[in-house]
């Protein structure tokens, strides 16, 4: 009796894992949540979406700024820079670039595989 239920349990586990991995790509974190409480997101991988408002490229660093209506965040990337006005989703790791007094810059380091 238990042996007949094992394939069903395996199928359910596979479906659950596929759903969980798909959720990371569908659901995004609002930029305001990251900026309001960066300690909760430091070192974590998140997905944000919005419109590109600025781009910058220097020999050793490339970044762009994305705005979602709740705030804006800088995305550091090794990929080709998007054009201003592009609407996109970006998956990356939240880091504090620097902090001086009460000023801080929170950035998202884009994952290379996305």
Image (tube, rainbow, N blue to C red):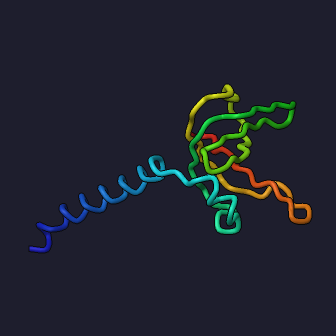
Vertical order, 103 against 57 (above or below): below
Q: Position of residue 54 (x, y in %)?
A: 74, 33
Q: Position of residue 94 (x, y in %)?
A: 68, 56
Q: Position of residue 79 (x, y in %)?
A: 68, 33
- For image coordinates 78% across by 58% down, the residue present is 96
Q: Is residue 6 left or right of residue 105?
A: left
Give the quarter of the image for residue 100. Answer: bottom right
- For image coordinates 63% across by 40% down, the residue present is 112
Q: How many numbered dots are placed on residues in this image?
A: 0
Farthest residue to the top: give it: 83
Farthest residue to the right: give it: 101
Q: Position of residue 80 (x, y in %)?
A: 69, 28
Give the quarter of the image for residue 44. Answer: bottom right
68 vs 63, nearest the viewer: 68
- For image coordinates 44% across by 47% down, the residue present is 26
Give the quarter of the image for residue 61. Answer: top right
Farthest residue to the front: give it: 69
Vertical order, 27 against 65 (above or below): below
5 vs 85, nearest the viewer: 85
Image quadrant for the C terminus?
top right
Farthest residue to the bottom: give it: 2
């Amino acid at each position: 009796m238990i042996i007949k239920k094992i394939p069903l349990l395996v199928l359910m586990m596979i479906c659950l894992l596929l759903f969980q991995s798909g959720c990371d790509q569908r659901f995004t974190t609002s930029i305001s949540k990251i900026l309001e409480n960066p300690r909760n997101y430091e070192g974590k991988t998140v997905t944000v979406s919005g419109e590109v408002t600025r781009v910058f490229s220097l020999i050793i660093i490339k970044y762009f700024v994305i705005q979602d209506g709740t705030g804006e965040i800088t995305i550091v990337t090794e990929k080709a820079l998007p054009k201003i006005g592009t609407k996109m989703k970006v998956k990356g790791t939240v880091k504090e670039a620097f902090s001086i007094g009460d000023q801080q810059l929170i950035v998202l380091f884009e994952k290379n595989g996305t």
